[in-house]
Image: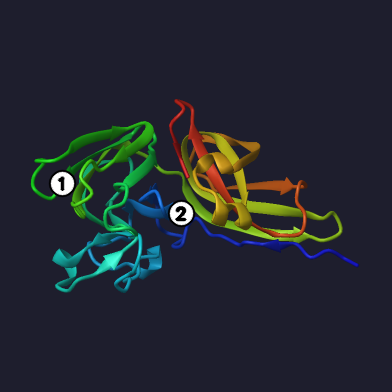
C-alpha cells in the first residue's frame, strides 16, 4: 500500500508585494502548553485589524490566554494574537507600542512567562500598566521574562527596530514527491540584502502540540543565498527524512553578520 504523506502547506508572505518582519513570543502560565503570539512590521499593516496578515478578533477565553489589545485603534475591545504595524520602507528604524494582556489558567498559579529569540536588530521593553511600578525589563537577544506579580494582567510592550531589513519573500510552497517518499520545498525572493542563506527547519504537528520551544524544531538543511540582489531568485530543497504524518516547515533567513528572521 502506498503511504500518504500529509504536508502542512504554509506561506510566509501573505501579500506578494509586502515585506514582513515577524517577532514570535512563546507564552505560558506554567500549567498550560505554550502559545505563540506575534508582533512585527509589514508594508501593508495598519493600527487596526489586518486580516491579510492573520490579525483576527478573538472572543473572551477561559483558562490561560495571551493577547494584544488594539481597542485604542478600533473603538471597541479587540483582542488579537498577531499585531503588526506599518513600515513604509526597509531598512526600517522605529518604535512600536503594543498592549499585551493575559489570563492565568489557575487564579493563584505561577506568573505569566514569555520566551523570545530576537535578531540583533531588535530589542524590546516591557513594563506593567502602572508605569513600571512592579516591573520594567529590557529584552534583547534570547531568553525569557516572568511577570513577578501574577495579579497584573496587562503590560506595555515597546519594540525597538534598528535598521531592520527583511528578505522580500514572494512565495513558499511544498509538494509531496510520492515516488521518492519525500517533500520538496520551493520559495522565491524578489530582493535580498546581505543574505547569507536559509536554514530549513521542520517540526511534526504531533511534537508541536505536545512540546514547546524552538529546540523541538529540527534544522534539516541550509541553502546559500545570493547576498545582495534586486533580481528575483528561486530556491528549492528536498526533505527525504519523512514518514507518514503532518509537518510544519519554516525558513530561517540568516544575514552575513549572523542576524536572522523567520
Disc nearer the start of the sequence (2/1): 2
Q: Is residue 86 left or right of residue 120?
A: left
Farthest front residue in view: 108
Farthest right residue in view: 1
Task: Locate the N terminus by quadrant.
Answer: bottom right
Residue 205, percent from left and from top: 61, 57
* 10 Å crowding of disc 2: few (<14), some (14-19), many (20+): some
- The answer to whether the residue labelled 2 contacts the one labelled 1, judged by CB atoms less than 8 Å apart, is no
Residue 223 - label: none
Residue 33 - label: 2
State the colouring used for the structure image.
Answer: rainbow
Estimate the spatial distance between the alpha carbons at disc 2 and disc 1, rounded to whole Å: 24 Å
Residue 178, percent from left and from top: 82, 61
Corner quadrant of residue 100: bottom left
* 10 Å crowding of disc 1: few (<14), some (14-19), many (20+): many
* Residue 7 vertical placement versus 163 (above, below): below
Q: Which sits in the foreground, 98 or 197?
A: 98
Taking the spot 28% from the left edge, 68% from the top edge, the residue there is 49
Q: Which sits in the foreground, 39 or 47?
A: 39
- Element on which disc 1 rests: strand
Q: Is residue 262 left or right of residue 125?
A: right
Taking the spot 44% from the left edge, 52% from the top edge, the residue there is 34
* Residue 133 vertical placement versus 98 (above, below): above
* Residue 208 vertical placement versus 259 (above, below): below
Count of numbered circles on the image: 2
Residue 250, percent from left and from top: 56, 49
Residue 88, percent from left and from top: 27, 52
- Element on which disc 2 rests: loop
Taking the spot 62% from the left edge, 41% from the top edge, the residue there is 218
Q: Which sits in the foreground, 83 or 63?
A: 63
What residue did someone put label 1 on? 128
Q: Nearer the viewer, mark 2 or mark 1?
A: 2
Amino acid at each position: 500500500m502506498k503511504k500518504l504523506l500529509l504536508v502542512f502547506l504554509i506561506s510566509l508572505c501573505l501579500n506578494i508585494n509586502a515585506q514582513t518582519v515577524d517577532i514570535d513570543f512563546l507564552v505560558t502560565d506554567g500549567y498550560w502548553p505554550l502559545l505563540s503570539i506575534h508582533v512585527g512590521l509589514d508594508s501593508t499593516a495598519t493600527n487596526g485589524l489586518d486580516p491579510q496578515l492573520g490579525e483576527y478578533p478573538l472572543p473572551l477565553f477561559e483558562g490561560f490566554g495571551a493577547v494584544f489589545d488594539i481597542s485604542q485603534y478600533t473603538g471597541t475591545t479587540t483582542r488579537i494574537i498577531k499585531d503588526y504595524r506599518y513600515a513604509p520602507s526597509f531598512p526600517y528604524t522605529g518604535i512600536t507600542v503594543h498592549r499585551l494582556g493575559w489570563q492565568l489558567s489557575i487564579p493563584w498559579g505561577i506568573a505569566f512567562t514569555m520566551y523570545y529569540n530576537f535578531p540583533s536588530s531588535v530589542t524590546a521593553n516591557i513594563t506593567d500598566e502602572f508605569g513600571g511600578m512592579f516591573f520594567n525589563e529590557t529584552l534583547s537577544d534570547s531568553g525569557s521574562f516572568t511577570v513577578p506579580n501574577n495579579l497584573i494582567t496587562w503590560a506595555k510592550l515597546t519594540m525597538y527596530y534598528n535598521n531592520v531589513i527583511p528578505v522580500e519573500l514572494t512565495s513558499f510552497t511544498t509538494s509531496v514527491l510520492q515516488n521518492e517518499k519525500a517533500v520538496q520545498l520551493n520559495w522565491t525572493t524578489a530582493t535580498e540584502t546581505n543574505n547569507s542563506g536559509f536554514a530549513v527547519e521542520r517540526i511534526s504537528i504531533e511534537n508541536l502540540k505536545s512540546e514547546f520551544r524552538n529546540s523541538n524544531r529540527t534544522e534539516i538543511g541550509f541553502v546559500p543565498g545570493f547576498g545582495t540582489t534586486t533580481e528575483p531568485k528561486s530556491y528549492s530543497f528536498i526533505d527525504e527524512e519523512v514518514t507518514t504524518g503532518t509537518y510544519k516547515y519554516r525558513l530561517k533567513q540568516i544575514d552575513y553578520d549572523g542576524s536572522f528572521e523567520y
